[in-house]
Amino acid sequence: MTLLEVRGLTVTYPGGAEAVRGVDLSLAAGRKLGIAGESGCGKSTLALALLRLLPAGTRVGGEILLDGEDILTMRWGRVRAVRWAGASIVFQGAMHSLNPVHRVGDQIAEPMLLHANTTRVAARKRTGELLEHVGLPPARARAYPHELSGGQRQRVMIAMALACDPHLVIADEPTTALDVMIQAQILRLIEQLVSEQELGLIMISHDLAVLADTCDRLAVMYAGRVVEEGPARAVYEAASHPYGKALSAAFPRIGDPASRFAPRGLAGDPPDPSDLPSGCTFHPRCPVALDECAVQDQALREAGQARRAACVHVGAAVPGVAAVQDARSTP
């Protein structure tokens, strides 16, 4: 059963910056979709658009169907209810997302009081249960955000996202600024919750290795578009698009001597959304670009079983990491 379907989503900020350009995605209940890309590629804008959290004056087009209902055409009252009972979000940076002058238990209980038609006594009880569910003692409900560690604050954010039993959870860089041990704990917790509660999960990260270990499918974004999409492990280990290859090669694989010779990313940055290059937007940084890439954009096309990629090389012999490395070493 399809839980979320995004069709032709576009987001243009005031001033003309095209942050999201024609994105199509789908997610079934109980499944996990990863969205990867560098900063500035449109990942967080996409997440905010899914719950209509973008600033005033932003133009949004396309369709966002949650359980068959288009979020973009809902009345505001309905949107407010859907934001917690239908879908919720774990924002990047828990310390900046939690209110510093309110106890965390009150912040977890607030959406239940607003949207779940419950009493304060029942909300406090449910808050304790949620804290236990994410690995914290119920007594921590009386703590203020500054009294908790980074990992504990992130657990509080996850508990808050689950407060009204949503069908979809969007996690925007949920492990940013956490050490590797705490990161592993948070990722295991998220996987467990998705499995137990049949949630749909969208996880956003710049780290392909994390997404490959956590998600079922992976979409790679560049300049506001999905340039590759497919099974997470397959995309990570053998990307079809040169950008996906570069992202994957930036993470060395322990125990693989060949990874020592892989490039550590690409030179330059993603283009300014208000001044996109012609043709394929990746071509100025692409080590295997052809002349036609500068004038002709590429649509997603079949790139193997349940895989798609937007590259002229798809269907031909796609250059691998060695070609990328050679191209970068050329003056």
Image: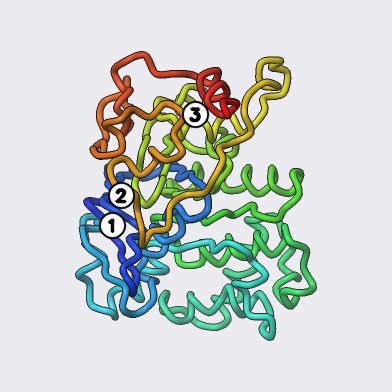
The image quadrant where one finds the C terminus is top right
Q: Which residue is mark 2?
A: 3
| Rendering quarter of residue 329 | top right
Q: Earlier in the sequence, mark 2 or mark 1?
A: 2
The disc label shown at residue 245, or none = 3
Q: Is residue 10 visible?
A: yes
Front residue of 149 and 245? 245
**At x 53% / y 61%, what residue is drawn?**
90
Front residue of 182 and 93? 93
Query: How far apart are labels 2 and 1 at the CA level?
Result: 6 Å
| Rendering quarter of residue 57 | bottom left
Q: Earlier in the sequence, mark 3 or mark 1?
A: 1
| Residue 279 at x, y percent in the picture | 28, 42
Q: Which residue is mark 1?
A: 66
Foreground tag (3 vs 1): 3
Task: Please determine whether, in this image, residue 43 is positioned above or below residue 27.
Answer: below
**At x 25% / y 39%, what residue is drawn?**
295
> Amino acid type of disc 1?
Leu
